Structures are given as structure tokens and as C-alpha cells.
Image: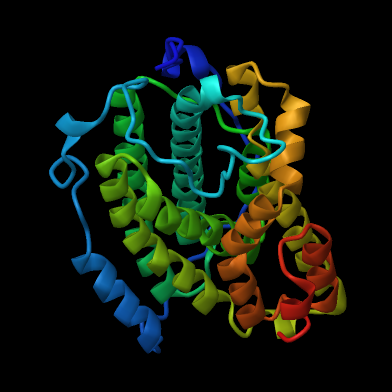
Amino acid sequence: MAQIDAPQAWGKAVAEEMTVQAEVAARFTWRYDGRDGRLTAMYEKAKSAQWNASADIEWANVPEFGSPLPDQGALPGVPLRGRAGSPVPAHLWERFRWEYHAWMTSQFLHGEQGALLATSRIVETVPDLEAKLFAATQVADEARHVEAYATYLDRLGAAYPIDPPLRTMLAHIIGTDAWDLTFLGMQVIVEGIALAMFRLGNATSFDPVIRRITELVARDESRHVAFGVLALEGLYPELTSRELAEREEFVKESALLMARRFGMDEVWERLGVDVAEGVRFTTTDPIMVDFRRLMFTRVTACLVRVGLFTDSVRAHLEQLSLVRPSSAAHR
């Protein structure tokens, strides 16, 4: 097996913070009746579906970074081994698998912290009580997710900083004063993509511990995405043309940022692979293109349900190769 360099843990890889200034209005409601039956059911399920990151995961089985891996030719959405134009030479394949694993898990962790802050904001700003109650259960969910992924990466001994597109996306979500954009950015777009990644990763990861974590997290995330759709249904048809255009631009910018996340610039840099060549491959390889479309499938379905899969948004997603023109035309 090729020699794998010492991993970068948190102290070396992540030594910064981000402060986002936002001026938002906290909203009280004194109406405690008129509950939405769908949200009530989700709230009851959320209360009974809590799990304990300390007790429900076999932490002693976290693998050592760089240890020999089972012979597995593929990674979720990364068809690099043996493919023409692959930027990863054969002697770096084992190391690449470990770096990709640490990078992807690190981005999950950073996204979960973003969800923790965003959902805390939702509790404060959403107008109706039922949504506040469910959002409070999500705050607990997100805290547990952060705990689980942070513990895993600490035991793994390798980590990556937040990638720039995700950092920018979280700043947009936390910085907005419009509660529906917090829902749209976090519950629909970020968590919609994350849910797809969790489910694919759970089926293909070489590590049973991370499969268990993502299995538990995905159960929670499916409720969160459904919550976002329920909260936004019926809202956008009531907006003015200017307000709707602002939401469309938010979706377009968010889609561009999320698409750029799949370039994996930081992985190529740490491997010593030409970054431009690595990004070119992840951007143009047909299987990678199909992978990104798969990751956006749930996001697209949610946009359709809330009334934001407009002609303008559809054309933008087609341009980014995030939806197929034929399927988009038959929404």
C-alpha cells in the first residue's frame, strides 16, 4: 500500500471562525389554536424519534485514518478509478479514498452547524406556533448531528475546513432577514442535497460507523426537508412579482454555489494533484454530471411543490447541468 501522509486534524486544518451580522425581528404569537394537522404529526414523530449520539454509535470502531481499506473500486459520485482522464494516479488511489472520506464528512459537519444556527433563527422568526414547536425539535436534532460528526472526525484524526461555496451559502442563509429564505436555503436546498448524499453514502461507504451515523441523521433530515416544504407551500403564489424575482435569484445563486461544492478543490490540493485538472474532471465527466443531477432531484421536486420551479429557475438549473432538459420540460 502507498504511504499515506499524516492527516490534518482540527487544530491544524480549522483555525478560524465566521461571524455573520444579521438584523432580524423575533416574532411572538399569542394564538395557540388552529394547528396544522400535518405539522402536529411531524412534531409528535420528532419527539419520539430522538436518538443519543453517545449511546447509539459504536465509537470504539471508528477506523484509523490511512489504514488498509477493502477493495472497493468506486466512491459515492466519484468515478475516478480506471477512467480515462481521471486526475488520480493509481498510486494515490488509496490515499484519495481517505482524503475524500475526511473531506466529505467534514462538509457534512459544517453544514450541520449551519443547520443548527439556521433552525435556531427559524424558531425566532417564523410566524406560527406549530412551526416554532417543530423547529425546536430540529434544533435538538442538529445539535446531535454536530456532536456525532465532530466526534467521528476527532476520532478519525483527519478533517477539512469548510469549503468556500458552502461557507458563502451559510452566510447568505444566516444573513437574511426573511424567514422564508432561511427555510428555502437550509431546509430545501442544503438539506435536500445533504439527504441525497447521506442515503448514497450510507449505501456505499467502507466504514460501518459512518454508515450508522448517516442512517440516523438521514431519518431526521427527511423530516426537516418535509417541514421546509410544508412551511413554504402556498406562500410564493401570494408574493408580488418583485418579491418572487428575489426568491428566484436566491435559488439560482444557491444552486450555483452548491454545484461548485462538487469540484473538491481542497482534496486535489492536499493530494498534490493539479487543482484545475481535478475540477475539470469533476465538472465535465458524464458520471459526475449525472451524480450532481441525482443530488438535486429532491431539491427540484421541492421547488416544484412550493411554486419556485419557474421557467427562469429551470433554465438556470439546465445551464448548470443540474436537471435534464427533457425531464425539466415536463414538470
Residue at position x 79%, y 57% from top? 320
For the image, the number of numbered tags is: 0
Residue 217, given in percent of the width and then of the height, sits at 34, 54
Task: Give the quadrant of the N terminus.
Answer: top left
38 relative to 261 in the view: left or right: left
Query: Is 225 or 121 nearer to us in this picture?
Result: 225
Residue at position x 79%, y 74% from top? 325
Residue 195, given in percent of the width and then of the height, sits at 46, 59
137 relative to 290 in the view: left or right: left
Query: Is 51 or 246 nearer to us in this picture?
Result: 51
Q: Is residue 128 above or below residue 50?
A: below
275 relative to 208 in the view: left or right: right
Query: Which residue of the protein is positioned furthest toward the left in this rendering?
Result: 55
Residue 197, given in percent of the width and then of the height, sits at 48, 54
Residue at position x 56%, y 20% from top? 16
Query: Is 190 or 183 nearer to us in this picture?
Result: 190
Residue 50, given in percent of the width and then of the height, sits at 22, 59
Res. 176 in view: no
Q: Quadrant of residue 309?
A: bottom right
Residue at position x 71%, y 85% from top? 331
Query: Is 312 or 276 nearer to us in this picture?
Result: 276
